[in-house]
Image: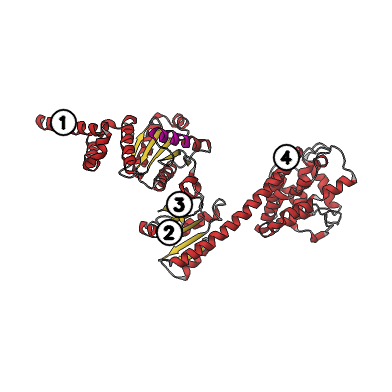
Amino acid sequence: MSSLYNYRKSCIEDIDRLFWLLFNNFSLAVKMNNKYKNLQKEYLAVVGATCKDNLTGLFNYGFFQMIFEYEFLLKTKNSNSLSLAAMDIDSFSEYNKSVGRLKGDYAIKKIASIIKTNIDQNDYAARYSGNEFKILLTDNDYRKNYVKIEKIMSHVEKSFNGNLTISSGFSVFPDDAASIENLITNSNTALLQSKINGKNRIYKYNHISNLFDKNNKRILVVDDDRLNVKILQTFLMASKYDVIESYCAEDALTILKRIDIDLIILDIRMGEISGLDLCEQIKVDDSFRMIPVIILTAFDDIENKIRAIEAGADDFITKPPNQHELLTRIRSLIKVKDLNTSLANIENVLFSLANAVEEKDPYTQGHIRRVAEMAVALAKKMNLSSTEIEAIRYGGILHDVGKIGIPVEILNKPGKLSPTEWEIMKKHSIGGYKICLPLKKSLKGALDVIRYHHEKLDGSGYPDGLKGNEIPLSARVMAVVDIYDALTTTRPYRLALSKEVALKTIQKESDLGKLDKNVVKELIELLKDWHEIDHF
């Protein structure tokens, strides 16, 4: 037994000496790389325990640095790429305090296991410090390395039910750095950026946009059959599209949260969550619903087509797809998405203008948000249609946008406006309407709210002197809520009224036939439901 032990010990020492020789003579290591690659792996398997972190089983700091230097030299010699990811557990000190050290250690160990499971055999992971990890990714395609980190982050978030997450910084040699030191510095800089921007994120040095050609559209292909993904990837990339691969719904959702995607191609059958289920999840999320989705199915029957349409799919095509047909549909759907994005950007400009109006008048800051939220709540209480509610939502945000053209001295005048000044002020309804009119296809009924929210049922309002049912119901709702908010907030010309006094004023207006009595009644009931008034 003793002789066998000594023999094995002698063999390990010989391997040890040879391996350290290779690490300490890098030029020799590179020359002998292929011959001794298996010996290197054998060494790590036999004596690597002394170079590993006791808690996690990942490499320790010192040994990781030596591997890093070796791989860096090898990649430099062969003009290949190398990626480094810095990962840190978010708010771990607070988590450790709340659950205790033993559970904290268990969490670190579990995350290390997730890391090991999701990297390749030729990648290296280390516990760099208490709750910080570094991963050396040796695949030449850094986009694939990036996806590995995405998967690790997704699995961690899922394993801890969102109670524990990790942030990551990602840097690539030679694109981002020409030396080991710069690669480490850049990955740490990217990690810091992900922390600053909300945690549970991954940032590439100089940000994610560098991962892809900025001129190419990005297509997310989701299929649990890797061969299908590769086939699609090959001909889509040949057509100048950037392709992001995903093999399950969970990973696809994670990618969508972190990468701007122009189109999604889903297989209809995948693991626990089907392509149809994933499509439904995408289409109910405001962040993703404008992304066109193509469903791929091997079943050319009416039932699956109907289900795809019900799930919100923008198109469907039978596998294997005709390449020309698929590319034609992709181009068409992306063109529509770009148009919708342009309209959304214009809407954002309008919303910014609405906020700019509030900046001109400090007495009305918060007015558009309060009015929009209360008007929507009132519309829902009145069981208005989803179309009317949407018009009220946008109309509430944009109803005063025309005040951007009203002089500040009129907006902020502490006393009563002169007849001339009042005529100028009244122009804001038509002014706002004209500003928003180019978006009539997307704003639709909101334009009525913008133009008519100062009309009165008896025809005494402005700008058009409409009467009764000539005024759209959405505008009548907005008129009541707008007046209520104006009365209950301080203005240059008077102090805020109490809720009860404001409601009495509004009710008097409805008794005089100026405001919709039913809308006023529903507003009073809403305020009672919110416990803002006890009785009225």
Name the residue carrying label 3. 252
- Whether 511 is drawn above or below 10: the answer is below
As shown in the figure, which amino acid type bears the numbered disc 1? Lys
Dot 4, crowdedness within 10 Å: few (<14), some or many (≥20)? some
Q: Which residue is mark 1?
A: 9
Residue 348 picture location, percent across and down: 65, 49
**For residue 359, which numbered disc appears in the image?**
4
Residue type highlighted by circle 3: Ala
Query: Which quadrant, please, contains the N terminus?
Result: top left
Is 257 located above or below residue 100 in the figure?
A: below
Q: Earlier in the sequence, mark 2 or mark 3?
A: 2
User: Spatial distance from mark 3 to mark 1, Cα to Cα?
Assistant: 49 Å
Real-space Cα separation, disc 1 to disc 4, in angstroms? 78 Å
Identity of the residue drawn at 50% across and 59% down: 293
Tell me if residue 182 is in the magenta stretch: yes
Q: Which residues are magenta?
A: 179-190
Q: Position of residue 102 (x, y in %)?
A: 38, 30
Residue at 43%, 61% in the rendered image: 268
- The residue to which callout 2 is attached is 238
Residue 150 in picture, x, y percent from top left:
43, 45
Residue at left offset 57%, top offset 52%: 286
Q: Is residue 504 magenta?
A: no
Q: Which amino acid is tagged 4? A: Glu
**N-terminal of the two: label 3 or label 1?**
1
What element does badge 4 sit on? helix
Between disc 4 and disc 3, the foreground one is 4
